[in-house]
Amino acid sequence: MPDQASRADTAWQPSAVQRERDEWRRRRTVRSAAIAALSTLLLLGVVGGAVVSSPGWDRVRETYFDWDKAVSSFPAVLEGLWLNIRVMAVCWVLILLLSLTVAVVRTLRGPVAFPLRLLGTAYVDVFRGLPLLLVIFLLGFGGPALSLQGLPTSPLFWGGAALVLSYSAYVAEVFRAGIESVHPSQRLAGRSLGLSYGQTLRHVVLPQAWRRVIPPLMNDLVSLQKDSGLIAVLGVTDAIRKAQIETALDFNYTPYVVAGVLFCCLTIPMARLTDRYARKKGYHGAGGHL
Amino acid sequence: MTTPRPELLRLDGVRKSFGDHVVLREVDLTVQPGQCVVLIGASGSGKSTLLRCVNLLEVVDDGVITFEGRDITDPRVDGDEVRSRMGMVFQAYNLFPHLDVIGNVTLALRLVHGVAADEARARGLAMLDRVGLAARAQARPDDLSGGQQQRVAIARALVANPRLMLLDEVTSALDPELVGEVLDLLTELKGEGVTMLLNTHEMGFAREVADQVCFLHDGRIHERGRPEQVLGDPQQERTRAFLSRIRAS
């Protein structure tokens, strides 16, 4: 059967009607692409022109886009970024663990699990409601003040804890949505084979949920990459804090731009990777096209 | 076979409702080892619910289900252990899409029955061979036809040597030309002495394999008996009406 089909395919030549359609589609594509390119250039030109021709442009350029300042501050900012990357990596692992636990707890059924569910729901509600910056301030200054035995008092630790607590509330909801998107018949099938509730969750539900939530998880990871810069407010010398220090030398704000570009260099590849993964897995509506 | 064999499964006065909707009012039923008992009845008559109650996927509101001489409706009974001794096959197959075919078949062997990976694989492959799908062991369920998926589901349910097979409308989701391969397999299993409790709309199949046909109506078994009697010469008006509707369609 397949052989026949492929032989027929090689013999096929498009008819005159089809050739005319293809030609029309090709012309239209070229025309549309030309219009899109032109209008994009025009828009960028207008915006760029407006900025450059503004009365204060020369001062802005000196203060924000000073090439020599960029070069001189680059090593310090890059060094700070390395801290951001480490904070992000450690926090991401902890976020995944905590949020998965919270999500599983929130999907438990039965009156026995009610206190746990209540705790999970309260946690998610509170930490999704609190602005991240506020959590960082509260924990960053309040945490060390507790002087808890065995816990470090460094702003890095408490800033990281704030990131983990805040992000886990969001990510827990992502996991919960994934868990609940697995059709109940899958649980039934697992249980009917004699698997326990936990085994069904571990071997049937979570593997399927996990696959479905990878795109939104990667989205949150991109978000965490840049929000890791917020702990600079505690005085942690990350990229943003380093930029601040460099800026304070001569009130030239170029180091901030350098930090911004470096953050984009981290997040943009991650965003493209997310899109590609989502498309490869055939998620509809997930991941924009470039 | 001089002494009467003890029944494998017995239902006494089983009742199950969902909210105000009473699905099973008072169901009495017995299944002997090696028997094939077929439930028939209109959609919504409670056939699937009955199978789920037996599999302890639903908790009965009242009544007693005895399996291998033990009351499994007792809340102190370990439901997982009971389910591990039954095999259930669903209308929509319910295969695990994230596992390949052999992974589906061996999951319970490894996790529930404590069979080592190598042996589980060997037994799984033998079972797949039995249902004619050994060549597709590495395939994903989504890459199989409906009939193949349902045969994998049967293999998955059968691989741990269950005492009882529960088959819930296993051909209802299949294209007509795929129904035969599944029914042929069930007929063979019946010939091998596998005990089965199933529901179906395939009356020809019921007539062929059933030792007993039970017509479920209004939450009760309205009529029961040999297939040739219930299907060929029904005594109850309701049964006649149901069968004529089935044949008309």
Image (cartoon, coloured by chain):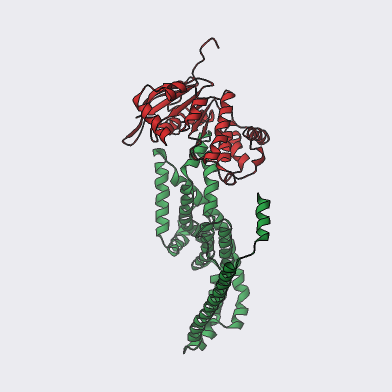
Residue at the limit of the structure toward the left, as seen here: B20
In the image, residue B171 lies at what x, y percent?
51, 36
Residue B105 lies left or right of residue B206; in this view the side is right
Q: Is residue A225 visible?
A: yes
In the image, residue A10 lies at what x, y percent?
68, 60
In depth, the one of A148 and B89 nearer the eye is: B89
Image colour for chain B is red
In the image, residue B203 lies at what x, y percent?
47, 30
* Rendered view: A202 above or below A174: above
Residue at the limit of the structure toward the top, as seen here: B2
* Rendered view: B65 above or below A37: above
| Residue at image point 61% right, 41% down | B101
Q: Which image quarter: residue B75?
A: top left
In the image, residue A192 lies at what x, y percent?
51, 34
| Residue at image point 48% right, 35% down | B169
In depth, the one of A88 and A45 nearer the eye is: A45
Chain appearing in green on the rendered image: A
The quadrant the C terminus of chain A occupies is bottom right
Q: Is residue B78 visible?
A: no
In depth, the one of A113 and B145 nearer the eye is: B145
